[in-house]
Amino acid sequence: MAIALGVLGAALWLGIAGAAAASPSTAQSALNGRSNDDCFRCHGRQNMRSRTINVDGEQKSLFVDRTVYDASRHGKLDCTSCHIGFKPGLHGAGETQAWLVTAKLTACANCHADVFSMYQSSFHGNLVFAESSGQAPVCADCHVAHNITPPDSPAFRASIDSLCARCHADQLKTYLDSYHGKAFYLGDVKTAVCTDCHGGHKILAPSNTQSKVSKQNLVATCAQCHPGANENFAGFMVHVNPQSPRSSFVVWTFYALYIMLIAVVFTFGFVHTALYIYRGFKDGLYRRSHHG
Amino acid sequence: MASTGEAITAEATPTQARTRIEYRRFNVFHRWMHFLVFVSFTVLVFTGMPLKYKTTEWARWSMDLFGGVTAAGVYHRIAALITVFYWTLEFTFMVVMVLRSRGKLLKGPGTMMFGKKDLEDMIGMFAWFFGKGPKPQFDRYTYWEKFDYMSLMAGTVIIGMTGFIMWFPLWFTKVLPGVFLNIALVIHSNEALLAMGVIFIFVHFFSAHARPESFPLDKVIFTGSLPVEHYKAERPLEYARRVREGTLDEVLVEKRITWRTYAADVLWWTITAFAGFCAILMTAFIIWSVFD
């Protein structure tokens, strides 16, 4: 009897704790008795795909794929958790602007205050908040608004290079030609990607002493994966283009020397081989029988 | 492939036991050395080249073959250790042989070192290609075989050194500046392309499979010996020298032609097909390199 009571008590305790953990913070929820079902009744319809709305100069589709959203990290959150300010009823472009801008820029901070403040003080955050840049990335540009995945998941890590490359295409090219980049391109998501060296939320210019890739911090950044790294080790250049003498003259010199050597050897080899085959056919040597 | 005692018993009542007098060009040591080079070089190419040509379909296919880029890296390092092993053994063997001959091996007519005759032979070959003279007569090693051997021995040092710098970057940067890591990659990658061109097209595979004298397959490195008549035509100077010195019987073997001989032929033909595949692949890479 005592055991049964104990089990019952434990089950109750766990049930309450679980329910408390599962319920999203209700402070931001303003569904007013409605549910995500009501939102998806319109925004989940295929014909919404072609309809767009202008948010900060960017055309956004009004369609949200429910299966993708439900499976995402935020799948259990109410739509209004992020689209704060929503009022039930039909809504036109004018009144929705504020909800969308909030969702895009500041809503994340309600739950993720720590990383949001890091982002705010970063190079990107500074562009957005201090210089009102419409081009610098905000949270959803990297984390994908309706398809949030855990940032250390293989799928998300595999997408990081293309996220950064939207603006930093040249750096992507040199990265992909480096040790890490080659392995990454061929499917190794454990190798260092952009954010492992530059940071994710608090990305700063290398000239900033707080930057992970500044002279002061570079050795420690390398040592995250390469314990025992020293100044020499950190002197390795990730973003170097061997084909350009302006990128690194020393590296380019070795590249140029090898290209010349290869060109000479291959050209000579091609001529020698082609002439040998030509003479072989001309003299009928290929038709002669061999004994093995 | 000298007959063993067992083979003789098994073929005790043969209906058509044939024998053939063959010239033993390579001993067991040579053949095992070549086998180690063959296996390690192939693995190194198929696990390394996908990194250089990472954007090709073939790169992904080859990585998948080895179970992904991380596993391929392990195979690459195992093959590298085999390379260190055979290089050390071969180099030691050569030094011992040269010392035992009191330096004669570096100078005599059958030497592997380059000499004046090699230049004359090369000029003679070009004259022959254009129908301006007879084909030069060769001794034990032709100039392209010497180049093949020397470029492998020297190239292995270069590609091995740079490979170990990349394998143990922390250890090497205790002394070397970080730019050596960049240089190591440029050298390793281009030396690999050079080695592959020499082995897969212009010198080695051409010499073994596509030369009029060896077409479609010269299997002597696998079997150790070849028909005397064939060798006499290929290397008349060495043959004449042995006749003159009375040492011909040292290298003549009586080879039994059994079903094993034909079974082995299946293997040599498989290798020929594989060599053809590698040559086509290599050609595609060279074209890719030029237009990339």
Image (cartoon, coloured by chain):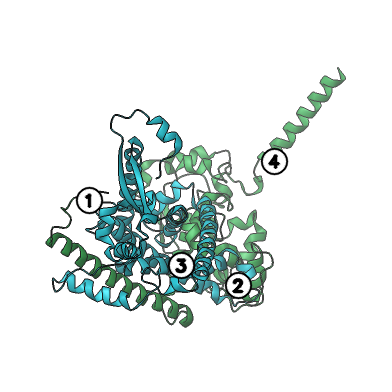
Chain colours: A green, B cyan
Q: Are marks 1 and 2 on the same chain?
A: yes
**Which residue has dot 2 on it?**
A213
Dot 3: what SS? helix
Q: Are marks 3 and 1 on the same chain?
A: no
Amino acid type, callout 4: Ala
Dot 1: what SS? loop
Q: Residue at x 24, y 59 (%)?
A: B233
Residue A20 higher or lower than A109, as above or below: above
Amino acid type, callout 1: His
Quick check: A26 left or right of A250? right
User: What chain is tagged by disc 2?
Assistant: A
**Which residue has dot 4 on it?**
A21
**Which residue has dot 1 on it?**
A290
Measuring from the top left, give residue B153's x and y in whole percent: 46, 67
Quick check: A46 left or right of A186? left
Q: Are marks 3 and 2 on the same chain?
A: no
Foreground mark, 1 or 4, reads 1
